[in-house]
């Protein structure tokens, strides 16, 4: 059954349909929460809150919209709320204007698949992601990991599409810089051209 | 096209969302600029590294608790509306 059909059945009182929706997306919501918050308990809380919120507001959900995008929106807001509470931040900070220029440029020693297979690299990869500012990390996770379009990412985060693109570029470049320092072959290092 | 201009278009090029005329300019620059070629390749590999990873598995106990709480809430909502 499609998500739309499951939502329709769930709205009509079919518990199994709602449970199927949860089963379909629980790992992705949990992964997003875990990568945003870097804490298992917080990730569990956000996952639970997200599905409870989806259940609470299911009656008002328009079936022609994407349930998945809507769910990601709920989870994103819940995760950001935890982060802001941790740091005591009341509101959004100003958007930086500059984009980081590549400094360490080198070809990677191995393919992503080979790198991912090595035991010692998993934590390094997650640490690089955790070092991103949360507003860049969220956009990267939604767009590049979860596969939402720029438009869907904008809807899920409440940002403009232009802001999504800027944050995505910053995230990609920062991750590239960190990962290339870890996995790049120093003997292939190139000097960036003067700007 | 200079390296600076390339940065501004990097997302669109990597995502295949770029205007064909600009794409041609972009690729012309890439053909003569090794650092930019490597940066584009690095970015593609960076995305693949995170995208191809499997989503975290829910801890078993948490999953059971989550589904139990949601079932209870679902049934409570049904009772309240019927």
Image: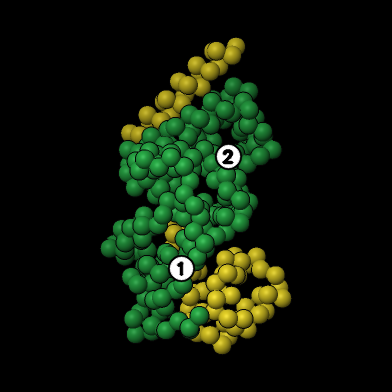
| Colour representing chain B | yellow
What residue sits 52% from the left and 42% below the top? A72
Q: Secondary structure at mark 1?
A: loop
Camera-side residue: A44 or B4?
Answer: B4
- From mark 2 to mark 1, how far is it between C-alphas? 31 Å
What residue sits 43% from the left and 29% below the top? B67
Camera-side residue: A167 or A64?
Answer: A167
The answer to whether residue A28 shows anywhere in this view is no
Instruction: Note the chain letter of the green one.
Output: A
Packing grade of label 1 (10 A; few <14, some 14-19, many >=20) is some
The answer to whether residue B78 shows anywhere in this view is yes
User: In terms of image quadrants, where is residue A63?
Assistant: top right
Location of the N terminus of chain B by quadrant is: bottom right
Chain of the residue on which disc 2 is drawn: A
User: In terms of image quadrants, where is residue B20?
Assistant: bottom right
Total number of numbered discs in the rendering? 2
Q: Which residue is mark 1?
A: A100
Q: Which residue is mark 2?
A: A70
What residue sits 65% from the left and 36% below the top? A4
Camera-side residue: B56 or A191?
Answer: A191
Farthest residue, direction left: A120
């Amino acid at each position: 059954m499609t998500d739309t059909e499951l939502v329709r059945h769930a709205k009509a009182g079919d518990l199994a349909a709602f449970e199927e929706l949860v089963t379909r997306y629980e790992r992705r919501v949990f992964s997003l929460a875990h990568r945003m918050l870097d804490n298992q308990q917080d990730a569990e809380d956000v996952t639970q809150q997200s599905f409870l919120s989806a259940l609470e507001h299911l009656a008002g959900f328009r079936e022609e919209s994407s349930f998945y995008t809507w769910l990601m929106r709920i989870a994103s807001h819940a995760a950001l709320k935890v982060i802001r509470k941790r740091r005591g931040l009341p509101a959004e900070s100003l958007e930086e204007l500059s984009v980081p220029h590549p400094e360490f440029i080198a070809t990677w020693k191995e393919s992503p698949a080979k790198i991912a297979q090595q035991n010692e690299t998993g934590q390094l990869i997650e640490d690089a992601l955790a070092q991103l500012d949360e507003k860049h990390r969220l956009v990267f996770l939604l767009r590049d990991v979860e596969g939402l379009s720029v438009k869907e990412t904008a809807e899920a985060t409440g940002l403009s599409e232009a802001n999504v693109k800027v944050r995505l570029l910053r995230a990609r470049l920062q991750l590239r810089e960190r990962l290339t320092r870890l996995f790049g072959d120093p003997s292939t290092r190139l000097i960036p051209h003067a700007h | 096209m200079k390296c600076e201009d390339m940065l501004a278009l990097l997302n669109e090029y990597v995502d295949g969302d770029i205007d064909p005329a600009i794409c041609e300019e972009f690729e012309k620059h890439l053909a003569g600029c090794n650092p930019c070629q490597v940066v584009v390749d690095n970015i593609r590999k960076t995305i693949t590294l995170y995208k191809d990873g499997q989503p975290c598995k829910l801890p078993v106990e948490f999953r059971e608790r989550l589904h139990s709480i949601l079932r209870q809430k679902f049934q409570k909502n049904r009772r309240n509306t019927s």
